[in-house]
Every structure is written in C-alpha cells, then in structure tokens.
Image (spheres, helix red, strand yellow):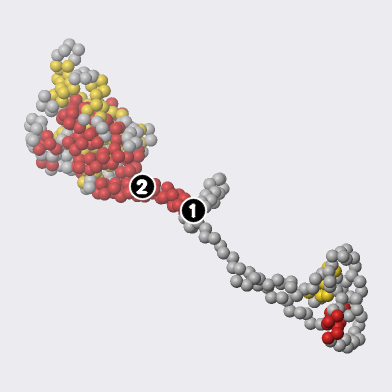
Amino acid sequence: MPENPDPFAHLPEQEADPVEWDPQQRRFIPHSPRADSAAASPPPPPPAAEPPQERDQRRFFVGASAVGQAPPPRAGADALATQPPAPPPSLPPFPPTVVPPGPPPGPEPAPLPRPEPSTAPGGRGTPRRRRRLKWIVVICLLLPIVLLAAGLIYAEIKFRQIERVPVGSLLDGGGSGTNILVVGSDTRANAEGSTAAGEPPGERADTIMVLRLDGDGAKMLSIPRDLIVTLADTGERARINAAYNNDLGGGPGRLLKTVQQNFGIPINRYMEVDFVSFAGLVDAVGGVNIDFPYPAFDSQSGLDVKQTGSVKLNGEQALAYVRSRHYTEIKEDGKAHEDPTADLGRVERQQAFMRAVMGKVAGSRNPITLLRAGGEVTDGLRVDDKLGLFGAIRLAWDMKGSHPESVTLPVAVNGDNATLHLQQPEANQVLAGFK
C-alpha cells in the first residue's frame, strides 16, 4: 500500500528560501525570486500605468531567523503578485467515518399528559364540559315541567274513569262557599238484601251529608235518613232517603232538589261514595284513626275493637265499623251496652269515618300515597257531570290539611219513635252557617 504523499513537499525549506503568505493570492509565495525562475524566463513587461492603490500591508513573514521582524523589501514582488495563482495541492481523501452500531431502539416514550382545564372560579373549562353543563341545567329546568305534565296526564286518565251523575243543571252557583252533597251507600249490604225492616230492596242512601268548604275551614253536616221532609217533584211527606231510592222513582236529582228546598241551602257539587270501595282507600292511605271511648264489637258486621282511645283501623275493620247496626260497647261495669240511638248512632260513626279518611288524604304530602288513593277512589266514586279535572284539583286544594268539623243537625223524635223532624229554631241557626 503506497504511503500518503506529503502535501507540503513542493514548498522549499524555510531556512534556504523562506516563504510568506500573500492574502490576495491566498497562498504562500517565496520571500525572494528564485534564481532558476529568473534565468529561465525573461523579465515581464512593465505593467501599464494604473492609478496608485494602497498596498495591502497584511503580510506575514515565515522564517526561523526573522520571527517578529518586518519583511525586507524585495524586487519583483508586484510582478509575482500578477501571476496566476498556482492550483492548490490535492489532498488525499479522508477516510469515511464509521459510526459504531448503537443499542436497539426501545419503545417510544409515552406522550406528556395534557394539562387539565381550569376549574377555578371563572375558568371556562373545555367545550365538551361546557356543553355537558348546559344540558344539565336544561334538564334540571325541564324535569319539574315534565313531571307536572305527566302527573296531569295520569290524573286526567284516572278522572275520566269516574262515573258522572247528570245533575249539573240542578246545581246552584250561589253561596259564599262550596257546599258538596255527599251520599254514602253500602252496595254490598244492599246486594245481600240486608236493609232495614219494612224497606224494599234497591239502591238507597245510607248516609247523607253536606260538606262545606270556605275560607274558615271545612264543616260536615249529617242529615239523618229517617228525617221526614217534603219530597221534591211529588210533594209527599216521607223519609229523606226515599228521595234517592230508585225503586220509589227517586234518584240523585230528586234528592238534590229535596235538600235545597227543605233546608234552604245551595248545593254546588254532588258526590256519591261507596263505603265498600272506600275500604281500599283506607288501605291506600295506611289506615285511619277512629276514637273509641270504650271497647266495642258487632258480631253481625265483624267489628271487634278491644282497645280504647285512638285506634288505627285497616280497610276491613273500617268497613265493619261503618256497617255496624248493633254497635255494642263494654263500659265500666264490664257489661255490654248496645247503642240506643240505633240509626243515628250509625250515621255519626259513618260521619266520623268520612272525616278521618278525608283528613288523612288531605293531610298527605306523599305523591305516591296520593296516586294510590286516587286509583282506589275512582271505583267507588260518582260526581256531577259539571265537575272537571281542574275543579276537582281546586276542591282538593281547599281541603288540603283540613279536618272537617262535625256539625249536628238538631232533630226530635216523632210519635212513632221511628222517624224524626227538625227541631226549630235551633235547626235554622245551624243551617245558616251553610248558606
């Protein structure tokens, strides 16, 4: 393999013939003209006259004996400067750089976590979070409206299932409050033929009440079914429940007119209640509390209460309570005493039952309980054909949280010891509160 040539072999020895660097030619030139070069070539012609130029003084003298001294003047330097520069010596190529193999590439580094959006007060967050927040706000605003609409739709469906009684044309729109004629019946007892002695079978009113709602609260007036009145349309003097009995040609319309004509009070709404169906309403509201001053029983209706004071009755026990015709109490002497008031006592018990049920429903704040109660009452309730859903809601609102006050109509027993008549003037004083 040949050795690398010396790139500086063409340069003369510095001791014999020093060289200096010419910045214009960018190469080293001899410090003095060489003798062989001067002898071989004729002297160059004198250069043409040119304007004097400032000579570049950046000269560097290279020599061992003249380090740090200015170069001496030499002849022919300008001539040499005009000669074309010699080509630079060729340098051997550098060997290629060999890069040693490195370790195999490992897995790419995990990307840096993105910065969390600002959650400080006033921070805007990401667009997705802002959109989610807007939807949450919209849902919170629309949810009560949707629930209210769903509740109204459900109430409308259940309200349409209630049977209507065509007495709207007979209702009176006067009065300072709202008087509701409530008729209670026991359809199962009538179906079984368990009516009072001497009465023909058929649909009949067991209980007749007037419920008044006004700004002062609620009052409930019971009208004994054995009260002798003048029947509307016929002018006949008979028991008031005969105006309702369909087997005698009566009905809701005749009863409504009979009450208005005999008592001089307006009737704004009409309602019929079936006590058998209301037993399910009692279970729907979780039972009702009835006050028992003494332990009581009735072997025919199934009533059996061994406690005293406020006793909670379920639907079956409440139905036995309102059906009782032989209500018997165990008093202090330990003996059984049957209620001597007979039908009047049963009317009072039915009135107490109605007050307890209405107070329990009106005082409930649980929407599930109210929905269950509404579902139960539709099967045993009939209302006048002029009552709409919003009218029923207004009545329910007027009854909200109220416990109707029981009002007794003053009556006296007739000579037959079976029928009653109004006791005046006390009766008119009581009726004045319902006008």
Q: Is residue 367 visible?
A: yes
Amino acid type, residue under disc 1 in the picture: Ala
| Residue shown at 20% from the left, 42% from the top | 379
Q: Position of residue 99 (x, y in %)?
A: 56, 62
Amino acid type of the residue that numbered disc 2 sits on in the rendered structure: Leu
Q: Residue 386, can we see it?
A: no
Q: Does 75 sit above or below residue 434?
A: below
Between marks 1 and 2 in the image, the one whose residue lies nearer the viewer: 1
Q: On the image, numbered disc 1 is attached to which residue?
A: 110
Q: Please, what secondary structure does the residue beneath circle 1 have? A: loop
Left or right of 142 on screen, residue 72:
right
Q: Residue 314 placed where, x, y %?
A: 21, 30
Q: Nearer the viewer, residue 424 or 393?
A: 393
Question: Where's residue 120, x and y in %?
Answer: 55, 45
Q: Position of residue 375 (x, y in %)?
A: 24, 42
Task: Judge the density around disc 1: few (<14), some (14-19), many (≥20) Cα neighbours within 10 Å.
Answer: few
Residue 218's label in the rendered image is none
Instruction: Report which quarter residue 197 is drawn in.
Output: top left
